[in-house]
Image (tube, rainbow, N blue to C red):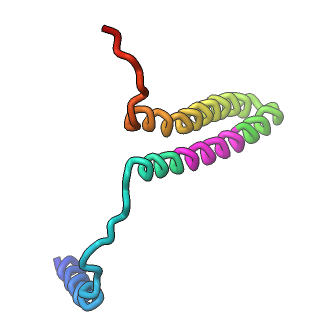
């Protein structure tokens, strides 16, 4: 119980130490100009990073699986097969990440101009 009270006291002291700094905070936030194109651009950037990271991990897994396979040990061969499956899954996720931005753009973007039969 004494330990909890001590931690609360330290937390209160730290909060009071930062109180003057917080009083100089910005009173109004500037308009971030967040529109549909900006959101889609952010989603595209994140998708590109995910694509690159997953492809890099997949290449490393494939190289390590090849090393284990070439060693020729029975346990290593089984582990290599599992790593190749994991690499294939990583490549599939990377390809899905590449398709997220166009999918969101088609859903949220302006109409495609299709004609409704009738």
Where residue 71 sits: x, y (%)? 82, 36
> Relative to the observer, which residue lies in front, 38 or 18?
38
Which stretch did the figure color magenta? 47-61
Above or below, comparing residue 97 to residue 39 in the picture? above
Does 24 sit left or right of 90 as displayed?
Answer: left
Q: Does the magenta stretch include residue 28?
A: no
Where residue 29 sits: x, y (%)? 29, 72
Question: Which image quadrant is residue 10 in?
Answer: bottom left
Q: Is residue 48 magenta?
A: yes
Please give the name of the residue rendered at 33% of the width and 66% of the height, measured from the top-left corner.
31
Please give the name of the residue rendered at 34% of the width and 15% of the height, measured from the top-left corner.
116
Question: Which image quadrant is residue 26 in?
Answer: bottom left
Where residue 16 sits: x, y (%)? 22, 89
Above or below, comparing residue 107 to residue 27 in the picture? above
Where residue 85 sits: x, y (%)? 63, 29
Please give the name of the residue rendered at 30% of the width and 8% of the height, measured from the top-left corner.
118
Does 17 sit left or right of 88 as displayed?
Answer: left
Please give the name of the residue rendered at 63% of the width and 30% of the height, measured from the top-left corner.
88
The secondary structure making up most of the magenta span is: helix
Does 29 sit left or right of 76 as displayed?
Answer: left
> Relative to the observer, which residue lies in front, 54 or 67?
54
């Amino acid at each position: 119980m004494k330990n909890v009270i001590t931690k609360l006291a330290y937390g209160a002291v730290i909060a009071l130490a930062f109180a003057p700094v917080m009083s100089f905070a910005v009173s109004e936030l500037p308009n971030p100009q967040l529109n549909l194109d900006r959101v889609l651009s952010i989603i595209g950037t994140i998708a590109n990073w995910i694509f690159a990271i997953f492809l890099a991990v997949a290449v490393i897994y494939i190289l390590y699986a090849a090393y284990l396979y070439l060693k020729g040990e029975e346990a290593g061969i089984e582990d290599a097969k599992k790593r190749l499956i994991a690499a294939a899954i990583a490549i599939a996720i990377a390809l899905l990440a590449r398709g997220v931005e166009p999918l969101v753009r088609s859903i949220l973007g302006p109409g495609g101009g299709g004609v409704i039969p009738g």
